[in-house]
Image: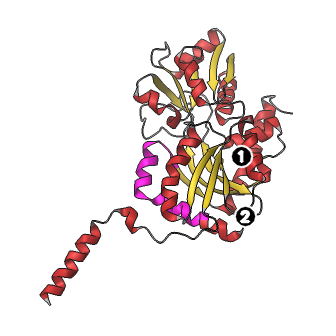
Amino acid sequence: MMKIGTALLAGLALLATVPAAAQTPAKLPYPVKLVTLVTHSTPGAGSDVVLREMIKYLERYIDTKFIVENDEGGSGAKAMARVAGAKPDGSMLYATTPTYILTSLLSKPSRTYRDLEPLVNTFTDSEVVYTRADAPYKSLNDVIAKARASRGRWGVSNPASLERESAEQLKTNAKVNAAIVSHDGGGDMMINVLNGTLDMGVGEIDEIRAQLEGRKVRVLATFNPNRLPGFPTVPTVSELGYKVVVSKFRGLAGPKGLPPSLIKTWEQAIQRVLADPEFKKSYAEDDLVADYIPHDQYGPFIEKFAADSGNFLKTAGMIR
């Protein structure tokens, strides 16, 4: 009896040492062997970084393989058209951000956000204002003062990005004369921030982390509603007196006609992925906030975001 009890205790002790990844529930079945996650982002930009980290954990919970492909061009128009024309079998999905809505509103491409099926949301991301470390600007108010005294130059990643909308809203709210300069991606913008061509850039923590850690740039403020846990001394834009609050959603969409069984699989998988302790540690370090929105709520969320963005763009005279 003692030997059985000792063996049982030893077995339980051994089980406790098994890594968390090995104790995950059985993988969810999936109809295809390979899933391509398409992003309009350039390599190393926000969506690209988030997707490449997330697929490590998706493969723990879904019985398939994942790859990420960067389909750049037209601020998301090329990627949207590609995914909209794919089979609705789960083999190809699109990484949604506000860019795919803003591109649809500003450029009116052949395929728009309405030609894709919103699947689930995963995160809310941060939008920050930053400048080079040796710039004369010690605060966002210094950048605003420069734009009041002479024409400021503010950088954004592309013409149809949430960064551009954030900068346009700040410009309007602060009543300053600033040129909003768009780029092909966050990397190109960073070059112009570092060489002093731009007074400031608007971007995401993930995109500028290497320069932050190298002490080449400084964060001046965040457009988020609250201060970032990783940067508690950095004020929000609204704290500084400018009524601009912006949060960036990150999710997935697919071709129209995704089967209900596939949608259910993704809803289950994303909840497991976001709850994974190892992944939680990873995305918390990147100042990403888990923000799961299921399929039946994600469509209305996207439509509301599009309506609100359309109203701002019309008010700002950017669309008719």
The disc at residue 235 is: none
Q: Residue at x 60, y 28 (%)?
A: 242
Q: Residue at x 50, y 35 (%)?
A: 205
Tag in front: 2 or 1? 2
The residue segment tinted magenta is 266-289
Q: Residue at x 77, y 34 (%)?
A: 313
Q: Does the segment drawn in magenta span residue 231? A: no
Which residue in the rendered view is the most extreme toward the bottom? Answer: 1
Q: Amino acid at mark 1?
A: Phe
Name the secondary structure under disc 1.
helix
Q: Residue at x 56, y 49 (%)?
A: 123
* Colouring mode (rainbow / by chain / secondary structure / one colour): secondary structure
Q: Quadrant of residue 190?
A: top right
Q: Nearer the viewer, residue 47 or 315?
A: 47
Q: Quadrant of residue 310?
A: top right
The image shows residue 29 at horizontal and vertical percentages of: 57, 71
* Residue that carries the numbered disc 1 in the rendered image: 305
Position of 20 compared to 319: left or right?
Answer: left
Q: CA distance from mark 2 to mark 1?
A: 22 Å
* Residue that carries the numbered disc 2 in the rendered image: 258
Q: Please identify the quadrant where the C terminus is shown.
A: top right
Position of 309 compared to 249: left or right?
Answer: right
Up-down relation of residue 244 to residue 97 (above or below): above
